[in-house]
């Protein structure tokens, strides 16, 4: 199993529905406050225009983060990793 830290816009653009991502959340995140500092997701999709794209992790629970905010360290997501077998 391989873990690749997501650090560039290009890495996010290559993600596709069904890819597995592990996210570590900052203390300010709702997930963290619910006791889930680290979560695993099968990606639901990417939406939005370039510069405003969101990585949708769980549409039912409205779990997502804005990619540019993550890359600028202003997101509730602290770190994200792509998991590949």
Image (cartoon, rainbow, N blue to C red):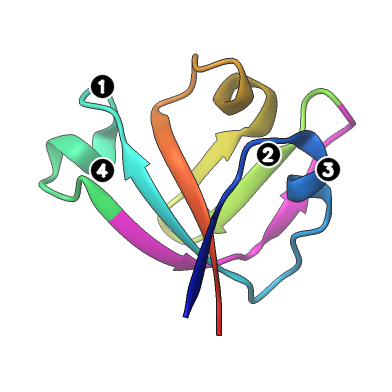
Residue 47 in the image, given as x and y percentages of width and height: 78, 46
Pointer 4 and pointer 2: residues touching (CB < 8 Å)?
no
Residue at far right of view: 50
Q: Which secondary structure, mark 1?
A: loop
Q: Which mark is residue 75?
A: none
Q: CA distance from mark 4 to mark 1?
A: 9 Å
* Residue 57 at x, y percent in the picture: 53, 57
Q: Seen in the image, is 56 located left or right of residue 53?
A: left
Give SS at disc 3. Answer: helix
Q: CA distance from mark 4 to mark 3?
A: 26 Å
In the image: residue 82, left or right of residue 52: left
- Labels 4 and 1 touching (C-beta < 8 A): no
Residue situated in front as seen by the camera: 46 or 13: 13
Find out whether the residues at labels 3 and 2 contact each other: C-beta distance under 8 Å: no
Nearest to the eye among marks 4 and 3: give it: 3
Alpha carbons under labels 3 and 1: distance apart? 27 Å
Instruction: Tell whether 43 sits left or right of 11.
Output: left
According to the image, label 2 marks what residue?
54
User: Separation of disc 1 and disc 2 at Cα?
Assistant: 18 Å
Q: Are marks 3 and 1 in contact (CB under 8 Å)?
A: no
Q: Nearer the viewer, residue 60 or 51?
A: 51
Circles 1 and 2, Cβ within 8 Å, touching? The answer is: no
Location of mark 4 (residue): 31
18 over 68 or under it: above or below: below
Name the residue located 74 percent from the left edge and 47 percent from the top edge.
12
Q: Mark 4 falls on what kind of element?
A: helix
Q: Which residue shows up at 63% across the image and 72% down it?
A: 19
Residue 55 position in % (x across, y down):
64, 46
Nearer to us in this view, 53 or 23 = 23
Above or below residue 75? Residue 60 is below
> What residue is shown with label 3?
10
Q: Quadrant of the C terminus?
A: bottom right
């Amino acid at each position: 199993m391989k873990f690749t830290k997501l650090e560039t816009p290009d890495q996010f653009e290559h993600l596709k529905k069904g890819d597995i991502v592990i996210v570590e959340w900052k203390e300010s995140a709702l997930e963290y406050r619910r006791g889930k500092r680290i979560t695993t997701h099968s990606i639901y999709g990417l939406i939005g225009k370039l510069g405003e794209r969101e990585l949708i992790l769980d549409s039912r629970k409205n779990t997502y983060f804005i990619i540019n905010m993550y890359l600028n360290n202003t997101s509730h997501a602290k770190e994200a990793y792509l998991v590949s077998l």
